[in-house]
Image (cartoon, rainbow, N blue to C red):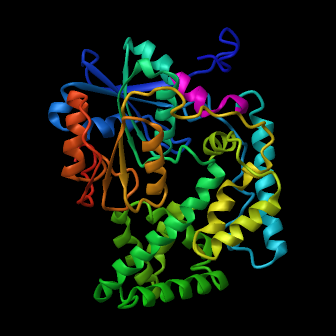
């Protein structure tokens, strides 16, 4: 692949693709798991194993590591693991020195990424990733490529459809990114949605007070959670899990309610004197610098370059979303100091696009429903199917016959369902091969 599509005969990069199914299948389904910056390799196997039998007979599934990721000429930011020791300081700074320390951490990450990725970083954009997808289509010998994208993968898919409408086949976008907002704006949209999802967790836990003993009302559980945050801020569990690690764990659990039982059992056990489960879970959810994710996110044009704006917007957001506002801002803070010029983005829907199927959880905290509704408006002729739950990237990852049947019919026939709603999904799907 050309590093720079403006110089197609210039420096080339590697793009790694993997597939599952027969090369003689009538349809090829290209899959992206989101991120941005998530490796796609292996996703095709998971998707293919969960497709209904009649759909799998018509499709082969493919995925890839997008440019800048994993096996496809990756972005490198050097060793950043020692910049922020754990247990980490609280995400919400108690004073100016704490805030300056985290601000310095973000500056160092941005500087290291710039130093290690001078040539690659300017070309790690959603537009170029979409152009890479069309090269994959050509390599697979298809006039049209079918596509399934989750989360950020919805933005990538919609960008591809806008650039290459004549080569866009049947496309499903699940957990839809808002096409009208900058990435900076979407993180503040997420904060309120994450807080609302946490309130659902507290209510769910209260209904199971006989199991977790954290309170018989949502308010009581919330109080117990906040008390735990204060205690871990003062004294991390076994010197490993402090308040920031707990916040990471909560944010991770918001993406799927199948994570709630293990989370609350770990909390209950910790309160009973056994912190082992909490430490393991928090270690798995702990934030780590993701160079690829930063590369794609920070390429957006919407990031303020003065920290005063970030501080003011985050403090305001924290008034209604105290558990997530500062966490979310620090996750993306290197974009405030990014040393690579931002790249103009393709305006999704600026060209006529074939009708697309949009799937969305009503209470999805990572990509709120309002964003999917806006995507529906800019992609004329598309359809939006909303399930009543809050799990992120739920299609094929949980069993929801209402969604699954309509999506399967679309994949088999190209006929879109009407806009509509479905009940919340059921159990999580069995792992591949299980």
* Quadrant in the picture for the N terminus: top right
The answer to whether residue 12 is above or below residue 327 is above
Residue span colored magenta:
121-132
Give the camera-side residue of 98 and 177: 177
> Which residue does the image show at 79% across and 69% down from the upper left?
99
Q: Is residue 372 magenta?
A: no
Q: Main secondary structure of the magenta part?
A: helix
> Which residue does the image show at 77% across and 45% down from the upper left?
338
Q: Residue furthest top?
A: 9
Q: Measured from the top left, where is residue 82 in percent x and y?
A: 73, 57
The answer to whether residue 353 is above or below residue 46 is above
Q: Quadrant of residue 300?
A: top right
Left or right of 407 in this view: 29: right
Give the camera-side residue of 336 and 176: 176
Left or right of 50 in this view: 277: right
> Which residue does the image show at 37% across and 77% down from the upper left?
265
The answer to whether residue 64 is above or below residue 223 is above
Q: Measured from the top left, where is residue 353 in percent x and y?
A: 44, 28
Q: Is residue 349 visible?
A: yes
Q: Is residue 72 visible?
A: no
Q: Quadrant of residue 220?
A: bottom left
User: Could you tell me how many numbered marks the image carries?
Assistant: 0
Q: Quadrant of residue 392?
A: bottom left
Q: Measured from the top left, where is residue 16 in percent x and y?
A: 50, 25
The answer to whether residue 305 is above or below residue 227 is above
Give the camera-side residue of 385 and 42: 385
> Which residue does the image show at 81% across and 45% down from the upper left?
111
Q: Is residue 131 magenta?
A: yes
Left or right of 197 in this view: 83: right
Left or right of 161 in this view: 238: right
Q: Measured from the top left, where is residue 218 in percent x and y?
A: 40, 85
């Amino acid at each position: 692949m050309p590093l720079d599509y403006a110089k197609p005969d210039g420096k080339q990069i590697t793009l790694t693709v993997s597939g599952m199914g027969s090369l003689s299948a009538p349809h090829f389904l290209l899959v992206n798991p989101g991120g941005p910056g998530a490796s796609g390799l292996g996703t095709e196997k998971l998707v293919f194993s969960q497709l209904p039998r009649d759909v799998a007979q018509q499709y082969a599934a493919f995925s890839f590591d997008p440019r800048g990721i994993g096996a496809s000429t990756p972005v490198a930011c050097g060793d950043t693991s020692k910049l922020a020791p754990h247990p980490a300081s609280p995400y919400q700074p108690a004073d100016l020195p704490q805030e300056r320390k985290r601000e310095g951490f973000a500056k160092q990450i941005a500087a290291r990424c710039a130093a290690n990725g001078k040539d690659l970083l300017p070309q790690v954009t959603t537009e170029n990733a979409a152009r890479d997808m069309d090269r994959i289509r050509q390599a697979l010998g298809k006039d049209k490529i079918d596509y399934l994208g989750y989360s950020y993968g919805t933005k990538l898919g919609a960008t591809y459809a806008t650039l290459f409408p004549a080569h866009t086949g049947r496309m499903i976008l699940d957990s839809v990114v808002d096409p009208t907002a900058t990435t900076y704006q979407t993180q503040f949209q997420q904060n309120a949605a994450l807080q609302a999802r946490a309130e659902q967790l507290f209510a769910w836990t209260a209904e199971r007070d006989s199991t977790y003993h954290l309170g018989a009302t949502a308010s009581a559980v919330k109080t117990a959670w906040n008390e735990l945050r204060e205690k871990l801020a003062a004294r991390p569990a076994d010197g490993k899990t402090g308040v920031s690690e707990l916040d990471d764990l909560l944010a991770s659990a918001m993406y799927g309610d199948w994570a709630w039982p293990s989370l609350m059992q770990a909390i209950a056990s910790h309160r009973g004197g056994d912190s082992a489960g909490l430490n393991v879970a928090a270690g798995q959810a702990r934030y780590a610098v993701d160079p690829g994710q930063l590369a794609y996110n920070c390429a957006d044009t919407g990031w303020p370059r003065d920290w005063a704006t970030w501080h003011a917007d985050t403090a305001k957001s924290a008034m209604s979303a105290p558990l997530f506002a500062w966490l979310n801002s620090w996750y993306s803070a290197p974009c405030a100091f990014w040393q690579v010029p931002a790249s103009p983005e393709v305006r999704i829907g600026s060209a006529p696009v074939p009708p697309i199927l949009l799937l969305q959880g009503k209470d999805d905290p990572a990509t709120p429903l309002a964003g999917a509704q806006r995507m529906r408006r800019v992609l004329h002729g598309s359809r939006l199917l909303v399930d009543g739950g809050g799990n992120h990237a739920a299609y094929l990852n949980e069993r929801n016959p209402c969604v699954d049947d309509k999506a399967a019919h679309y994949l088999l026939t190209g006929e879109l369902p009407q806009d509509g709603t479905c009940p919340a999904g059921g159990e999580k799907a069995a792992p591949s091969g299980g």
